[in-house]
Amino acid sequence: MESPITLAAAAELLSRLVACPSVNPAGAAAAGPRLGEEAMADLLASIFWPWGADTRKVEIAPGRFNFIARFVGAGSRTLLLEAHADTVSADGMTVAPFEPVVRDGRLYGRGSCDTKGPMAAMLLAIRSAIGDGGGRLPATLCFVSTADEEIGATGAKRLAADGFRAEAAVIGEPTDLAIIHTHKGASRLRITTRGRAAHSSAPWRGVSAIAAMARVIEAIEGPLAERLAARRHAALGPPTVSVGTIRGGTQVNVVPDRCEIEADRRTLPGETSESILAEFRELLDGLRASDPRLAYEIAESQWWPAFEEDPHGPVATLVAAAARKVLGRAEMRGAPWTSNAGIFRAAGIPCVLFGPGSARQAHTADEHIELEQVVQAARVYEEIIRGFGANGGP
């Protein structure tokens, strides 16, 4: 069979994926038919059925679906290829988000880079690896498209909670064809300060929740950020913290009795959700000790664990060998962003990230990807599939 991994095939398949909107509803201004992952799951099912895969849709919330395709192999071991289905909002794009265009070797559209480019490369690789349906693969191959990676990773968390297991996994993200063996995690925290409302003509009768929050923000982006900067990870650098949103007050002539911020804390391997919350509570309790009027509430709204895999371990070695064979190089890196990899690794699935496209183009107003990179990634993924099945794999 002639290889299906060509520039024309990559453009055609990626165009189909981009033209199927799958915007994460939590990141969009309003509900609508272009939101959620159900249409993408249906499209993927229509692609995989003719290839002989066992397919399944798993609803994780209304209109939100994981998609699983499985090719049962001769052995007992399983390789997972995963790429999330959801994209960020298309608001403010300078190119048509769901009408993909190829220009100068690049395909433009929402999700083309993050992460439908890697997804298209995986599909091309799977089609090439299974051939015309002659023999069984030497190991079971699973492709999974998860929901809600961009906002809460609930799709990956559901997959892990349902007991999905594999001996190795490759997570498709735009890595510039580098192998990501470690990345930061993220904790999103909502902090609320409480005060007492009063007429602005007699502010001493009230307690300003905004003034209290100003002290909280100063402590977060001052002393806390400085303490974090002193911690180092060889590949990831220090953890970070920033305040991203603030809401408070009802009108200008009322002393505000409530103010809320959202803080983004990027974590290092070994840090936990519990340790992050404890760190913030210690900070807030210290502020309250100096001002007993400070009343606060804190809760974690989102959590992605940091991820770290041995760069000399079996799965990294497998992917590095495939990259060297196809690209002539295998570059190991760490990344400052987060992904589903930390969730899969915490569930006991060894994994690395690899894919076409650059994180610099993800989420941008003119999101695009180099089609040549999609083809190169597909050839690397195919070598990974073949390498995993050969001689027992990693």
Image: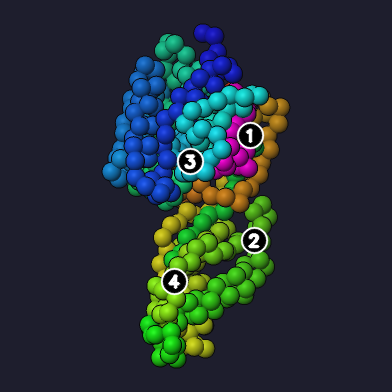
The residue type indicated by label 3 comes to: Ala
Residue drawn at 56 percent across, 59 percent down: 266
Measured Cα–Cα span from mark 4 to mark 3: 28 Å
Quadrant placement of the C terminus: top right
First of labels 2, 1 by sequence position: 1
Picture quadrant of residue 31: top left
First of labels 2, 3 by sequence position: 3
* Tag 2–tag 4 contact (CB < 8 Å): no
* Tag 2–tag 1 contact (CB < 8 Å): no
* Tag 4–tag 3 contact (CB < 8 Å): no
Measured Cα–Cα span from mark 2 to mark 3: 32 Å
Q: Which mark is residue 177?
A: 1
Residue 186: x and y in percent read: 51, 56
Q: Which residues are magenta?
A: 358-376
Q: Which residue is mark 2?
A: 238
Measured Cα–Cα span from mark 1 to mark 3: 25 Å
Camera-nearest residue between 37 and 67: 37
Q: Which residue is mark 3?
A: 90
Residue 127: x and y in percent read: 47, 19
- For this orientation, the residue located farthest to the top is 1
Q: Is residue 259 magenta?
A: no
For the question of whether residue 72 can be seen, the reply is no
Residue 52: x and y in percent read: 36, 18
252 shown above or below 29: below
Residue drawn at 63 percent across, 47 percent down: 334
The residue type indicated by label 2 comes to: Pro
